[in-house]
Amino acid sequence: MYGVKLLSMGKAVPVRHMTNDELTQFVDTSDEWIKSRTGIEKRHISTGETTTDLAINAAKEALERSGIDPRQIGLIVVATITGDYIMPSTACQVQAAIGAENATAFDIAAACSGFLYGAKLATDAVRVGSCEYALVIGAEVLSKTVDWEDRSTCVLFGDGAGAAIFQKHHKNNIINIYTQSNGGLSECLTLPSIPLKNCCVEQETRSPYMFMDGRAVYKFATTVVPMSIQRVLEGTSYTLDDIKYFILHQANARIMDSVAKKLEVPTDKFFKNLHEYGNTSSASIPMALYDLQEELKPGDPIVLCGFGGGVTWGSMLLVWE
Ligand code: COA
């Protein structure tokens, strides 16, 4: 078994930045309601940028910062629920765009836990020696999945991508990763794919948009996240007190405050950038870690925690280098 290090990161967002006030043109809402219930102030919305474009741009930045040759990358995992194509995968399109000709590339769908699921696969692969470098990307254009007449969902989400390259290393910085799912709760957060419409069935029977039971998701998140964070620390030499920052999936500031309270950890240890970006699903954790980079010092222990549709969740304990 080898050690694994987080080598470099990249981020990409659409150019258009939309404030809460601007949303009042589409739905009956207010800056005050959105800010007080979620902490979100703005989000980036695609005016043509695709999920693939964002994934490629984030990957290119991570690659540039890594200093490696793209042909050294053995694995590309893109976590997305908003790929432009079901086939080819977004990961294969990224592979072609960056010239990672020796990689195996595929997408995974684990919603807002997607980056952590991808990171688990990638770091496991590096750890056992299947590849030396693995690229994991969370990329979403969620603005195409929400009903812009449904104020209960359209105000929450944004578009963006974050990328990370993991490297085989003599030292191990990825101390632990844990993921889990509960398909029994799947109905609280759904996004339909291609509807059944063929020579036998003529009528589409379901809405094409994202559905969310906000209260059920809130309850799920505030229950599972403290448990997930404690679980990833179990069996390690780290305690909650040792952790410099917690980076949760950026869904809702109230969820973060509730988790901080349950764990009895100061809320300022929970990094937030959702006021700028809203909920970008699988992209939110790598985008947040990217934004926090400047403040991190070598040796800082950090916990990342994702939760989302499926339902899925997971955490990573890493030591910044
Ligand atoms: N603007 C103004 N009012 C709104 C609104 C909006 N954008 N969206 C909903 N409302 C209204 C509702 O219609 C309801 O009005 P009513 O009482 O007249 O029926 C009222 O606000 C309360 O709605 P409710 O859904 O009960 O609000 P809430 O306090 O549960 O907050 C969420 C809604 C979505 C912010 C909250 O449930 C939440 O954060 N859930 C978790 C969501 C999440 O994290 N999703 C991503 C997971 S990956």
Image (cartoon, rainbow, N blue to C red):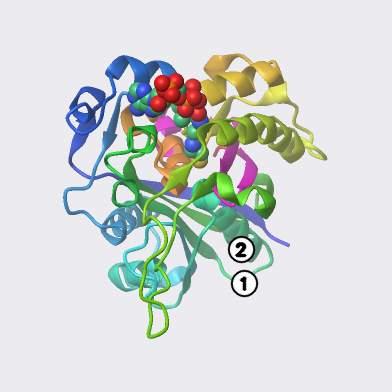
Residue 306 picture location, percent across and down = 57, 41
What residue range appears in magenta?
290-318
Residue found at x 34% / y 46%: 146
> Would residue 303 be counted in the magenta stretch?
yes
Camera sees residue 88: yes
- State the CA–CA distance, disc 1 to disc 2: 6 Å
Vertical side of 315 occupied by 87: above or below: below
Relative to 116, 192 lies left or right:
left
Camera sees residue 302: no
Q: What residue type is labelled 1?
A: Ser
Q: What residue type is labelled 2?
A: Val
Front-lying residue, 218 or 55 = 218
Mark 1 residue CB less than 8 A from any atom of ligand 1: no
Question: In terms of secondary structure, where does tag 1 sit?
Answer: loop
Q: In which quarter of the image is the C terminus?
A: top right
> Would residue 232 be counted in the magenta stretch?
no
Which residue, given by chain and number where applicable, does mark 2 sit on?
126
Q: In which quarter of the image is the N terminus?
A: bottom right
